[in-house]
Structure formats: structure tokens, C-alpha cells
Image: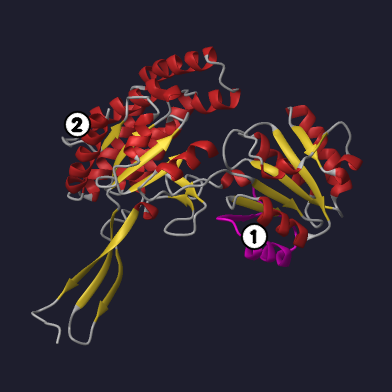
Amino acid sequence: MSMYIKKIAKEAREASYKMVNLTTRQKNSALLSMAKALRVNKEFIINENKKDLKAAVENKLKQSLIDRLALNDERIEEMSVSLEEVAKLSDPVGQIISKTKRPNGIEIDKIRVPIGVVLIVYEARPNVTSDCVGLLFKTSNVGILRGGGSAIHSNKAIGDVLKESLKRKGISFPVFFVVEKIDHKIVDGFLKEDKYIDLVIPRGGESLIRKVVDTSSIPVIKHYKGVCHIFVDKTAYIRKALRICINAKAQRPSVCNAVETILVHEGIAKKFLPLFKKESDFLGIQIRGDKKTSEIIQNIKMAQKKDWTTEYLDLIVSIKVVKDLDEAIEHINCYGSHHTDSIVTNNSKQAEKFVKEVDSACCFVNISTRFSDGHQFGLGAEIGISTDKLHARGPMGLEELTTYKYIVRGEGQIRE
């Protein structure tokens, strides 16, 4: 097994030196070819995905995980469109960040360059395979993609289709590697290959991410979980607040940008909560509320302290009635995961206070937390979402997959 790991890691490093010679035109042409290949081969990909879905049902995986795992025409089309949008974006590689000329005549350029070799560790979302290949390829990085065992057939199928497309474009060296062995020890092995791998990005549940962080000798960019909040201010338009909160919870509850806790100003709670409860009952959303919430709406579960830090990834939401914006901000900064938090308000001063004081990667005003997404931000796709504060924060697109180097030119100057 160690030989398998070492071989892939070494080949990835060697390929990264070749990647820097691909032009933007070559990369964009290849990305469009990959997008087309996904559409042409969607029946093959969906059939392979059915093998994973069958195994998931047999292994009694949670419905939320099966939802993440499933591929259909619509999701494959989204994957194709994502690759096309990445092709349209400006190539950050080679961009000059700054230029300086020193008094002695030395000229210093600070330019964007690829990170090199990036290990992506993810779980049951096979569309991640395509998204990561596109973003890494556009930024001239080489990816080692280790998806979860539950999606092995889907990931391999997507990888095979994309590799064949690249070959037809005359790119003969490997630009990404799909790890086909599902032994959990494989991940531990790759996480020690700091000689060849420059960065690790884990995408998945909190337990996976914490294990990667604890094991890795390579720098890791991550977010542990998405405990996202919406604060419904007393000045909010009721119907607008209702639409935003329902969308943030129910549109796709199994993802990290779904809302998990709704904070409601006590001045609007008696009007808002009964309407939210009615919509929730219709959609099958289970409410866990604090004491004040339970006094306004009945037949809900009482929230426990652990609910305020729980990422449900399901049709469950916790609700707390707060006295004002200060209490809402205090709650978010105390219990949140610094991922994405939103305020619904008709007061611009309240909105500005919220976005200034909430310590999260993404702070929204009058929109659903579901917009916390690289595609929605115009990044084409995202390689992941970071709640770290160094190098990258929030949805990570092309620029976050580059670092920089200094190019210094002179005419024979020596240091005295």
C-alpha cells in the first residue's frame, strides 16, 4: 500500500512541473472538452452511480447521505456547466499582484503561481470530483482525489471520462489522480507525503475533517461544520423572512450552507413563528425551540444546549427568541461555526452592525444562507469552504488555489 501511495504522490509532483507550461487557451479548450464529455457519457456515469446507490441502500446509509451521493441528468448538467464557467473565468496563474522598482534599479514582480499538488479528501458527493478537477486544472495544480468508498464507482467513472477527454486534447501526462483504493489507511498514508503534496483540503463531515487535521503533516484548509444562522429582525418583512428561512432549511438540507438555527427578535416572534410552524409542518421540518419559542408555538421539541452547536444536515431546525440584535450576534459568535450567517431586516443600520460584528466567513443581508457557494459567488465552482483566517476564507475559487513567487530582475547589481 505504501508503494501505491508513494507512486501516485511522486507522479503528481512530476506532473505539477509540466502543468505550468500549459497555456490558458489549452486549459480552457480542455475544460470545454471535459464538459462535453460528461454530457455525452452521462448514461454511463449514471449507471455506475446506480451501483453506489444500491450499495448505500443495502448498507442502510442515512437518506441525507444518499441524497448527496445520487447523480441524475440535472446534476450532471450542473457539473458540465460548472466546467464551462470555470473556462470562462480569468486565469489567475501568472497574474502580477504587484510591481516595485527599487532605487538601485532592481525590479520586483510578485506573481500568482500554482500551489502544486493538492490532496482532496471527500465523502459521498461525486460531483466534487468534477468540480475539483476543473478548478485545479484551471490553476495549473495537480489533484489527488480521494473520495469516499460509498461513491467509488461514480468517482472512477467521472475520472475515466475526464481523463479520456484530456487525452483527446493532446495532454498526455496525468493532471489528476482518482484514488481507487478505499482502505481508510490510504488517507493516513497520503497525509504524510509532505515531500510531494503541498496542501490538503478535506470536504465532508466534522469527524472526517478533524481526523485529517490531527493526522496530516501537510497544511490543511478546512471548515469543521456548517452551523449557519438566520436572524429575523423585528423590522423584517414577514413574508420575505419566511421565504428566506424556509429556503435556507428545506431547499437542500443535507449541505453545509443550510440554516441550522433561526434567531427571532421577540418583537416579531408572535407574528413570524406561527407562520413558520405552518410551513414547517407542511414540509416535514422538525422544530426544536427554546422556552420562549415553545410558549408561542406548540407541539415542538424543547431545544437542548447541544442543539445550538449541532449541524443537523436534515429537516430539523433549532429556534431561539432573542431580545435584540446584540443577543443574536452574541449567540452566533458563541455557538456558530464561522461559516455563513444572515440577517433579515429592513433597517440598514442593523444590517451594517450585523455584518461588522458577526465573526464569520460569509455574512449575508436579506438572502438565504444557501447562496454561500462558489458557483453562486461567480467562482465557477468551489474547491471547498474555509472558516480559517489564513490564506483562504469562505468559498474557495481560483485565486485561493494559487500562491505567489517573487521574480526579481536586475542588470548586474550586487549588494554592498
- The residue lying toward the viewer, choosing from 197 and 69, is 197
Residue under pointer 1: 358
Label located before the other in sequence (1 or 2): 2
**Amino acid type, mark 1:** Val
Q: What residue type is labelled 2?
A: Lys
Q: Where is residue 173 in the image (x, y as percent from the top left)?
A: 17, 36
Residue 96, percent across and down? 28, 66
Name the quadrant containing residue 349.
bottom right
> For the point 40% across and 15% down, which residue is it?
47
Q: In percent of the image, x 27 and y 36: which residue is there?
A: 176
Can residue 205 be seen at all in this image of the molecule? no
Residue at the image point whose x is 18% and y is 43% from the top: 14
Residue 384 falls inside the magenta stretch: no
Q: Name the residue under label 2.
A: 167
Looking at the picture, does residue 324 appear above or below residue 275? below
Q: Quick one: SS at disc 2? A: helix
Label ID, residue 136: none
Residue 84 seen in the current view = yes
Is residue 271 rendered to the left or right of residue 146? right
Query: Where 135 falls versus 129 (above or below)?
Result: below
Drawn side of residue 35 relative to residue 381, left or right? left
- Tell me where residue 290 sits by quadrant: top right
Closest to the observer: 3 or 201? Answer: 3
Q: Locate residue 281 relative to residue 336 in the image: left or right.
A: right
User: Over which residues does the magenta segment extend?
Assistant: 344-368
**Under tag 1, what secondary structure?**
loop
